[in-house]
Amino acid sequence: MMKAAIFEMDGLLIDSEPFWKYAERKVYETVGVFIDDEFLRQVEGLRIDEAIQFVYDRHPFTSKSKAQVEAEIIETMRQLILEKGVALPGVYQTLDLFYENKIPMALASSSSEVLIAAVIEKLSLQKYFIVTRSGEHEKFGKPHPQIFISAAQALNVYPTECMVFEDSLNGMLAAKAARMYCIGVPDIHRFDDPRMAIADRKLK
Protein backbone atom coordinates (compact mmCIF):
# COMPACT_ATOMS: atom_id res chain seq x y z
CA MET A 1 0.00 0.00 0.00
CA MET A 2 1.53 3.29 -1.11
CA LYS A 3 1.19 6.01 1.53
CA ALA A 4 3.32 8.75 -0.02
CA ALA A 5 4.76 9.94 -3.33
CA ILE A 6 8.23 11.34 -3.94
CA PHE A 7 9.10 13.32 -7.05
CA GLU A 8 12.42 14.08 -8.69
CA MET A 9 12.59 17.60 -10.14
CA ASP A 10 14.92 18.18 -13.09
CA GLY A 11 13.63 16.57 -16.26
CA LEU A 12 10.51 15.31 -14.47
CA LEU A 13 8.61 18.32 -13.13
CA ILE A 14 10.39 20.96 -15.19
CA ASP A 15 12.06 20.80 -18.58
CA SER A 16 15.37 21.96 -17.13
CA GLU A 17 17.78 19.58 -18.87
CA PRO A 18 18.38 22.09 -21.72
CA PHE A 19 19.13 24.71 -19.05
CA TRP A 20 21.68 22.40 -17.42
CA LYS A 21 23.38 21.76 -20.75
CA TYR A 22 23.59 25.48 -21.48
CA ALA A 23 24.74 26.46 -17.98
CA GLU A 24 27.35 23.72 -17.70
CA ARG A 25 28.77 24.30 -21.17
CA LYS A 26 28.88 28.07 -20.65
CA VAL A 27 30.68 27.87 -17.31
CA TYR A 28 33.04 25.02 -18.23
CA GLU A 29 34.11 26.94 -21.33
CA THR A 30 35.34 29.74 -19.05
CA VAL A 31 37.87 27.28 -17.62
CA GLY A 32 38.83 25.85 -21.01
CA VAL A 33 36.73 22.68 -20.84
CA PHE A 34 34.50 21.83 -23.82
CA ILE A 35 32.01 18.98 -23.36
CA ASP A 36 29.41 17.37 -25.61
CA ASP A 37 25.93 15.97 -25.01
CA GLU A 38 27.18 12.41 -24.51
CA PHE A 39 29.54 13.55 -21.77
CA LEU A 40 26.75 15.50 -20.06
CA ARG A 41 24.47 12.44 -20.14
CA GLN A 42 26.98 10.62 -17.95
CA VAL A 43 26.42 13.06 -15.10
CA GLU A 44 22.60 13.34 -15.30
CA GLY A 45 21.01 12.79 -11.91
CA LEU A 46 24.26 13.37 -10.03
CA ARG A 47 24.64 16.03 -7.39
CA ILE A 48 26.35 19.07 -8.88
CA ASP A 49 29.53 18.80 -6.79
CA GLU A 50 29.87 15.16 -7.84
CA ALA A 51 29.23 16.07 -11.47
CA ILE A 52 31.91 18.77 -11.31
CA GLN A 53 34.34 16.31 -9.74
CA PHE A 54 33.56 13.87 -12.58
CA VAL A 55 34.46 16.58 -15.12
CA TYR A 56 37.52 17.72 -13.16
CA ASP A 57 38.93 14.19 -12.94
CA ARG A 58 38.89 13.95 -16.74
CA HIS A 59 39.61 17.57 -17.64
CA PRO A 60 41.43 19.28 -14.74
CA PHE A 61 41.06 23.07 -14.68
CA THR A 62 42.99 25.64 -12.66
CA SER A 63 41.68 29.11 -13.52
CA LYS A 64 38.74 28.75 -11.11
CA SER A 65 38.05 26.59 -8.08
CA LYS A 66 35.44 23.83 -8.21
CA ALA A 67 33.38 25.87 -5.74
CA GLN A 68 33.43 28.87 -8.08
CA VAL A 69 32.34 26.72 -11.01
CA GLU A 70 29.50 25.28 -8.91
CA ALA A 71 28.30 28.72 -7.81
CA GLU A 72 28.31 30.05 -11.38
CA ILE A 73 26.40 27.06 -12.74
CA ILE A 74 23.77 27.33 -9.99
CA GLU A 75 23.26 31.06 -10.55
CA THR A 76 22.97 30.61 -14.32
CA MET A 77 20.44 27.83 -13.71
CA ARG A 78 18.43 29.94 -11.27
CA GLN A 79 18.12 32.75 -13.78
CA LEU A 80 17.09 30.40 -16.60
CA ILE A 81 14.45 28.69 -14.43
CA LEU A 82 12.88 31.98 -13.38
CA GLU A 83 12.97 33.38 -16.93
CA LYS A 84 12.03 30.35 -19.03
CA GLY A 85 10.95 27.45 -16.82
CA VAL A 86 7.79 25.52 -17.76
CA ALA A 87 6.21 22.40 -16.31
CA LEU A 88 6.42 19.22 -18.32
CA PRO A 89 3.19 17.70 -19.71
CA GLY A 90 1.06 15.91 -17.11
CA VAL A 91 2.76 17.41 -14.08
CA TYR A 92 -0.20 19.32 -12.64
CA GLN A 93 -2.67 16.51 -13.40
CA THR A 94 -0.45 14.03 -11.57
CA LEU A 95 0.17 16.29 -8.58
CA ASP A 96 -3.53 17.14 -8.36
CA LEU A 97 -4.41 13.43 -8.30
CA PHE A 98 -2.28 12.84 -5.21
CA TYR A 99 -3.27 16.14 -3.62
CA GLU A 100 -7.00 15.52 -4.00
CA ASN A 101 -6.62 12.04 -2.53
CA LYS A 102 -4.68 13.47 0.45
CA ILE A 103 -1.54 11.47 -0.30
CA PRO A 104 1.46 13.40 1.05
CA MET A 105 4.17 14.35 -1.42
CA ALA A 106 7.85 15.18 -1.22
CA LEU A 107 10.20 16.71 -3.75
CA ALA A 108 13.64 15.07 -3.57
CA SER A 109 16.24 16.46 -5.95
CA SER A 110 19.98 16.36 -6.40
CA SER A 111 19.76 20.09 -7.09
CA SER A 112 20.54 22.74 -4.50
CA GLU A 113 17.92 24.33 -2.26
CA VAL A 114 18.28 27.54 -4.29
CA LEU A 115 17.16 25.77 -7.46
CA ILE A 116 14.39 23.83 -5.72
CA ALA A 117 13.02 27.12 -4.40
CA ALA A 118 13.24 28.67 -7.87
CA VAL A 119 11.29 25.81 -9.47
CA ILE A 120 8.61 25.82 -6.77
CA GLU A 121 8.19 29.58 -7.21
CA LYS A 122 8.18 29.53 -11.01
CA LEU A 123 5.75 26.62 -11.35
CA SER A 124 3.59 27.59 -8.32
CA LEU A 125 4.03 24.22 -6.61
CA GLN A 126 3.87 25.49 -3.03
CA LYS A 127 0.66 23.69 -2.05
CA TYR A 128 1.75 20.25 -3.21
CA PHE A 129 4.95 19.39 -1.36
CA ILE A 130 4.96 19.14 2.42
CA VAL A 131 8.62 18.02 2.28
CA THR A 132 11.52 19.11 0.09
CA ARG A 133 14.94 17.47 0.23
CA SER A 134 18.07 18.68 -1.50
CA GLY A 135 20.93 16.34 -2.22
CA GLU A 136 23.35 19.03 -1.09
CA HIS A 137 22.50 18.10 2.52
CA GLU A 138 23.10 14.36 2.09
CA LYS A 139 26.45 12.69 2.58
CA PHE A 140 26.04 10.79 -0.68
CA GLY A 141 24.22 11.72 -3.87
CA LYS A 142 22.23 9.50 -6.24
CA PRO A 143 22.51 6.63 -7.13
CA HIS A 144 22.93 6.29 -3.34
CA PRO A 145 19.40 5.99 -1.85
CA GLN A 146 19.91 8.34 1.11
CA ILE A 147 17.94 11.30 -0.28
CA PHE A 148 14.85 9.12 -0.76
CA ILE A 149 15.23 7.53 2.65
CA SER A 150 15.52 11.01 4.21
CA ALA A 151 12.39 12.12 2.35
CA ALA A 152 10.46 9.08 3.63
CA GLN A 153 11.57 9.80 7.19
CA ALA A 154 10.42 13.41 6.85
CA LEU A 155 7.06 12.17 5.54
CA ASN A 156 6.87 9.76 8.51
CA VAL A 157 6.42 6.68 6.32
CA TYR A 158 8.49 3.59 5.64
CA PRO A 159 10.52 3.54 2.41
CA THR A 160 8.52 0.53 1.22
CA GLU A 161 5.35 2.65 1.45
CA CYS A 162 6.66 5.23 -1.05
CA MET A 163 6.19 5.62 -4.78
CA VAL A 164 9.00 7.49 -6.55
CA PHE A 165 8.76 9.27 -9.91
CA GLU A 166 12.15 9.49 -11.61
CA ASP A 167 13.49 10.26 -15.07
CA SER A 168 17.20 9.42 -14.78
CA LEU A 169 18.91 6.07 -14.46
CA ASN A 170 20.84 7.23 -11.38
CA GLY A 171 17.57 8.27 -9.75
CA MET A 172 15.87 4.96 -10.56
CA LEU A 173 18.82 3.08 -9.08
CA ALA A 174 18.52 5.20 -5.93
CA ALA A 175 14.76 4.57 -5.65
CA LYS A 176 15.14 0.81 -6.01
CA ALA A 177 18.05 0.74 -3.54
CA ALA A 178 15.72 2.48 -1.08
CA ARG A 179 13.20 -0.37 -1.68
CA MET A 180 10.63 2.03 -3.08
CA TYR A 181 8.19 1.47 -5.94
CA CYS A 182 9.72 3.31 -8.88
CA ILE A 183 7.85 4.82 -11.80
CA GLY A 184 10.33 5.72 -14.50
CA VAL A 185 9.49 8.61 -16.81
CA PRO A 186 12.60 8.73 -19.01
CA ASP A 187 13.22 11.14 -21.84
CA ILE A 188 11.51 9.83 -24.97
CA HIS A 189 14.88 9.31 -26.66
CA ARG A 190 15.94 6.95 -23.86
CA PHE A 191 12.61 5.28 -23.23
CA ASP A 192 13.77 2.01 -24.79
CA ASP A 193 17.18 2.00 -23.10
CA PRO A 194 17.29 -1.51 -21.57
CA ARG A 195 18.80 -0.12 -18.38
CA MET A 196 15.52 1.70 -17.67
CA ALA A 197 13.90 -1.69 -17.08
CA ILE A 198 14.99 -1.34 -13.45
CA ALA A 199 11.86 0.80 -12.91
CA ASP A 200 8.77 -1.06 -11.71
CA ARG A 201 6.82 0.73 -14.40
CA LYS A 202 7.71 3.14 -17.21
CA LEU A 203 5.52 5.99 -18.44
CA LYS A 204 5.90 8.33 -21.40
Image: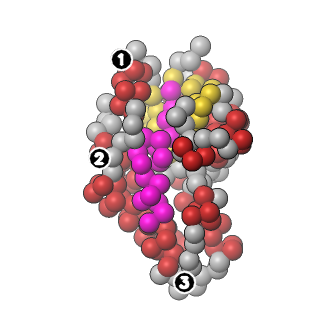
The residue carrying mark 2 is 122
The total of numbered circles placed on residues is 3
At x 51%, y 23%, the residue is 4
**Residue position for label 3:** 32
The boundaries of the magenta stretch are 5-22
Q: Quadrant of residue 172?
A: top right
Amino acid type shown at disc 3: Gly
Residue type pointed to by label 1: Glu
What residue would you read off at disc 1? 100
Q: Find the distance from the CA under tag 3 to the CA under tag 2.
A: 32 Å
Callout 1: few (<14), some (14-19), or many (20+) C-alpha neighbours within 10 Å?
few
Please determine whether, in this image, residue 75 is positioned above or below residue 9.
Answer: below
Give percent across and percent down for residue 182.
61, 30
Q: Judge left or right: residue 85 versus residue 140.
A: left
Please state the horizontal and vertical placement of residue 82, each as a whole percent of the image: 29, 54
Is disc 2 surrounded by few (<14), some (14 to 19) or many (20+) residues within 10 Å? Answer: some
Residue 72 figure quarter: bottom left
- Judge whether residue 124 is colored magenta: no
Is residue 51 at least partly visible in the picture?
no
The residue at the far bottom in this view is 63
In the rendered image, the quadrant that contains the N terminus is top right
Q: For the residue carrying disc 3, how many other residues have a C-alpha within 10 Å: few (<14), some (14-19), or many (20+)? A: few
Closer to the chain start, of discs 2 and 1, is: 1
**Which of these two is toward me, 46 or 85?**
85
Q: Residue at x 31, y 36 (%)?
A: 126
Q: Residue at the spot x=46%, y=74% of the render?
A: 27
